[in-house]
Image (cartoon, grey):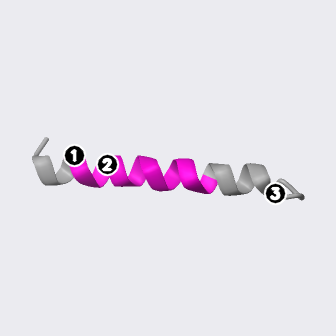
Amino acid sequence: LQQGDLVHVMVAEKDTARVEAILAQSPEGERS
C-alpha cells in the first residue's frame, strides 16, 4: 500500500462518514 493510496483511503472514509452523517440528519432518512 503506497502512501498516496493510504491518503486516498483516508479521504474516502472521511467522505463516507460525512455522507452517513448527512443521511442521519435527513428528516426522511432515505437509506437503501
Extent of the magenta region = 6-19
Q: Circle 1 sits in a helix, a strand or a loop, which is it?
A: helix
Q: What residue type is labelled 2?
A: Val
Q: Circle 3 sits in a helix, a strand or a loop, which is it?
A: loop
Q: Is residue 1 shown in magenta?
A: no
The residue labelled by disc 3 is: 30
Q: Where is residue 11 in the image (x, y as percent from the top left)?
A: 36, 54
The residue labelled by disc 1 is: 6
Q: How far apart are marks 1 and 2 (CA)?
A: 5 Å
User: Local crowd at mark 2 within 10 Å, few (<14), some, or many (≥20)?
Assistant: few
User: Local crowd at mark 3 within 10 Å, few (<14), some, or many (≥20)?
Assistant: few
The residue sitting at 54% across, 47% down in the picture is 17
Q: Which mark is residue 9?
A: 2
Q: Which quarter of the picture shows residue 4?
A: bottom left
Kindly report the secondary structure that dominates the magenta region of the rendered protein. Answer: helix
The residue sitting at 52% across, 51% down in the picture is 16
Left/right of residue 23 with respect to residue 13 in the rendered view: right
Q: Is residue 18 shown in magenta?
A: yes
Q: How far apart are marks 3 and 2 (CA)?
A: 25 Å
Task: Say whether disc 3 or disc 2 marks the residue closer to the N-terminus.
Answer: 2
Q: Which mark is residue 28?
A: none
Q: Distance between the residues labelled 3 and 1?
A: 30 Å
Q: Which amino acid does label 1 sit on?
A: Leu
Left/right of residue 4 with respect to residue 10 in the rendered view: left
Q: Circle 2 sits in a helix, a strand or a loop, which is it?
A: helix
The residue sitting at 13% across, 41% down in the picture is 1
Left/right of residue 7 with respect to residue 25 in the rendered view: left
Q: Do the residues labelled 1 and 2 touch (CB within 8 Å)?
A: yes
Q: Which amino acid does label 3 sit on?
A: Glu
Task: Say whether disc 3 or disc 1 marks the residue closer to the N-terminus.
Answer: 1
Q: Position of residue 26 (x, y in %)?
A: 81, 58
